[in-house]
Image: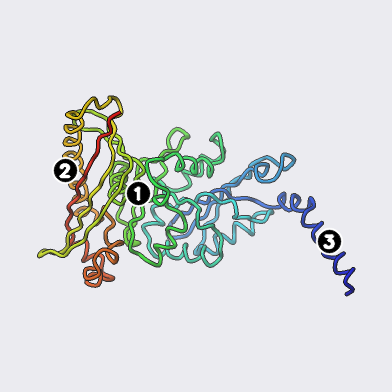
Amino acid sequence: MHRKSKIAMAVLMMTLLLSGCSSVELEHRNFPLIITLDKINGEYQVELGFENLAEVADQNAESKEAVPTKNTSGSWFTAFAQNNAENPKTMDYNHVKVIVLSKSVLDDKEMLKEFLEYIEKQNILARNTLVFSCENDSAEVMELNGKLEMPLGTYLEELIAGQRAVKEKAVVTVGTLLNELYNQQENIYIPIVKVEEEQASIEQYYVLANFLSVGVVSQELYQEAMLVEGKSAEYQFELDSGEGIVLSNVHVSYQSSETQDGCLEQAEIKADAMMQNKSILGVSQQQELKKQIEEYLNATVTAHATELQQEKNLDISNSYYRLGGYNRKLYKKYLDNPSLYLKDLSYEISFDITPVIE
């Protein structure tokens, strides 16, 4: 082909790519914004909730939101494939913001493993896709689709974005689960969507520890875990006297050591403290408040840490994950045996608080 012909062909191709053809293609696609996954009678169920096409194309595009589709099968591959085959429009997963994994899926280690391996191999979901769970079947969550002031996926995304108390690294995504699938060393706290009066809220968290289910914890215990793990941006609580306190500038240091009875995890948490409803008036009040806060947190957090360890086999400090960097001898001793480590573990959690005088 002559050089002029090659140039003309290249120009034609670029013209086609930059023309209105792409908007025509959009009209022939469905854009799942949220995917819910359930285990129903031992089978895999996938339900897709769709984006309003006008929000991803232009104002001339069809604006009616597509009706959610649902398929149940013996494998994730077939369930997803059926959704693709039964819909006249091509599925485009590039806009998926949220997946909701029911407790029945999270409880089944092999089913969860198969799902993560499937989406990784098929490259279906972006690693930053947010992960939620639900109180009952995830169909309950999907029923909110179309009943909110915005698409359900966007609503849940903003629900997480509004939680300013935790740092970004505390947010659970598909990437978080994929990393844990291969490492199996961390505690993963998945927010549970509570549906009530056509609204969604987060009051509990489903916990995976070493890729095994350890059950559900309250919002209070979740926030304490984030505090001890160093993932808190701020921490709010109330003293026994009724004073509201906000901790900020949180920094945590750790030390792991071997003891006669097993191993000891020491966590020292330093933070600034402000009163929510009063001002600190002077040095004497500052010292008294420091004492009250430290005594309260030392007692409360240590008691909850011991409770979670004994009742749920959960290490609130996530210390096994860090062990290799803090004590190589202990790391080698408990290598690939987190259950024995947890059995031998004891805590010393202390607080060093600086009340801020305004």
Image position, residue 313 (x, y; %): 24, 57
Mark 3 touches mark 2? (CB < 8 Å)? no
Residue 11: which disc? 3
Depth order, front residue of 185/146: 185
- Badge 1: residue crowd in 10 Å (few <14, some 14–19, many ≥20): many
Amino acid type, label 2: Ala
If you read the primary sequence from the N terminus, does the residue marked by circle 3 or circle 2 appear first? 3
Mark 1 touches mark 2? (CB < 8 Å)? no
Amino acid type, label 1: Lys
Residue under label 1: 231
Quadrant the N terminus occupies: bottom right
Relative to 306, 223 lies left or right: right
Image position, residue 166 (x, y; %): 38, 44
Mark 3 touches mark 1? (CB < 8 Å)? no
**Circle count:** 3
Question: Where 296 falls versus 35 (above or below)?
Answer: above
Q: Residue at x 26, y 59 (%)?
A: 319
Q: Residue at x 30, y 28 (%)?
A: 358
Which picture quadrant has residue 354?
A: top left
Residue 299: which disc? 2
Depth order, front residue of 211/115: 211
Q: CA distance from mark 3 to mark 2?
A: 72 Å
Image position, residue 332 (x, y; %): 25, 72
If you read the primary sequence from the N terminus, does the residue marked by circle 1 or circle 2 appear first? 1
Image position, residue 119 (x, y; %): 52, 62
Regarding mark 1 in the picture, which secondary structure is present there?
loop
Regarding mark 3 in the picture, which secondary structure is present there?
helix
Question: Where 189 falls versus 243 (above or below)?
Answer: below
Regarding mark 2 in the picture, which secondary structure is present there?
helix
